[in-house]
Image (tube, coloured by chain):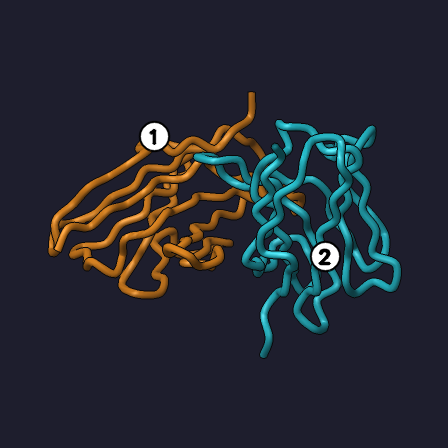
Chain colours: A cyan, B orange
């Protein structure tokens, strides 16, 4: 069974440029998460989807970040415009039905903003 | 503030040494507890979890963790580490069926 797929794995951009990350969760997993992981820190939740509905986006900086999961399967996270402080690893995870279910993580996208 | 604390930032051990990584949380209510591991160059994966029942849970690769409710702790243990256990270990708490909160992680280096 394929795991959570993310692309790209690495991205280097200049500040003020837009960037997008893509995630394809494990087949059949209804819940999808986007996390931000800074160096030396644990993952921090940005947004959680139940199917195509964003049920928790309280930690998403909505002035520059946006996300979508149009058909309740794969998802895109966008930053526009990127700032130097956005340099981090962006992780996608999925679980069967959210709640206490185990979350399966993708390899992440390492973003460097110059 | 509510948090998950991992007190050891970096632990260095020799092979065959015993391991204990601390994890404390400050959330009230019903909690479910997890330890995730990230091997070098790999993605986060579940090591073990506690939902209910026996507070001593066993995970993969000989790891175990004990939930002590009175101490708000969920420490990870392994009696004898191997070089292949070199990784970063994250404690995580799911509170009241809401989202997961992670600790900052503990980097474990096992010297051969």
Is A94 left or right of A57, judged from the image as shown?
left
Identify the chain of the residue marked 1, using the numbered disc in the image.
Answer: B
Foreground residue among B95 and B88: B88
* Few, some or many residues within 10 Å of mark 2 (<14, 14–19, 20+): many
Where does residue B21 sit, x and y in percent of width and height?
29, 41
The image quadrant of residue A29 is bottom right
Query: Is the N terminus of chain A in the top left, top right, bottom left or bottom right quadrant?
Result: bottom right
Is A68 left or right of A25, judged from the image as shown?
right
Query: Is the C terminus of chain A in the top left, top right, bottom left or bottom right quadrant?
Result: top right
Above or below, B49 against A36 in this view is below
Mark 1, secondary structure of its residue: loop
Mark 2, secondary structure of its residue: strand
Residue in the picture at 54% in, 31% down: B27
Is B19 left or right of A82, judged from the image as shown?
left
**Which residue of the protein is positioned furthest toward the right in this rendering?**
A70
Foreground residue among A108 and A98: A108
Residue holding disc 2? A22
Have a look at marks 1 and 2 and say if they share a chain.
no
Residue holding disc 1? B7
Residue in the picture at 67% in, 44% down: B98
Residue in the picture at 27% in, 57% down: B85
Above or below, A48 against A23 in this view is above
Is A56 left or right of B31, judged from the image as shown?
right
Identify the chain of the residue marked 2, using the numbered disc in the image.
Answer: A
The image quadrant of residue A112 is top right
**Which residue of the protein is positioned furthest toward the bottom in this rendering?**
A1
Taking the image as drawn, is residue A8 in sight? yes
* Few, some or many residues within 10 Å of mark 1 (<14, 14–19, 20+): some
Where does residue A110 sit, x and y in percent of width and height?
57, 47
Q: Are marks 1 and 2 in contact (CB under 8 Å)?
A: no
Q: CA distance from mark 1 to mark 2?
A: 34 Å
């Amino acid at each position: 069974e394929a795991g959570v797929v993310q692309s790209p794995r690495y991205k280097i951009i200049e500040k003020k440029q837009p960037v997008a990350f893509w995630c394809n969760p494990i087949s059949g997993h209804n819940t999808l998460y986007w996390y931000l992981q800074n160096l030396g820190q644990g993952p921090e939740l940005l947004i959680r989807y139940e199917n195509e509905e964003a049920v928790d986006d309280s930690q998403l900086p909505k002035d520059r970040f946006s996300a979508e999961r149009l058909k309740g399967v794969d998802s895109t996270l966008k930053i526009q415009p990127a700032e130097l402080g956005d340099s981090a690893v962006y992780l996608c995870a999925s679980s069967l039905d959210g709640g206490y279910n185990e979350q399966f993580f993708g390899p992440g996208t390492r973003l460097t903003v110059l | 503030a509510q948090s998950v604390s991992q007190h050891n930032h970096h632990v260095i051990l020799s092979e065959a040494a015993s391991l204990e990584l601390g994890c404390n949380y400050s959330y009230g209510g019903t909690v479910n507890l997890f330890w995730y591991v990230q091997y070098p160059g790999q993605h986060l994966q579940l090591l073990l979890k506690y939902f209910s029942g026996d507070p001593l849970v066993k995970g993969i690769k000989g790891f175990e963790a004990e939930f002590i409710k009175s101490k708000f702790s969920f420490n990870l243990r392994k009696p004898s580490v191997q070089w292949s256990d070199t990784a970063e270990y994250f404690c995580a708490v799911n509170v009241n069926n809401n989202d997961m909160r992670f600790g900052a992680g503990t980097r474990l280096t096992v010297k051969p």
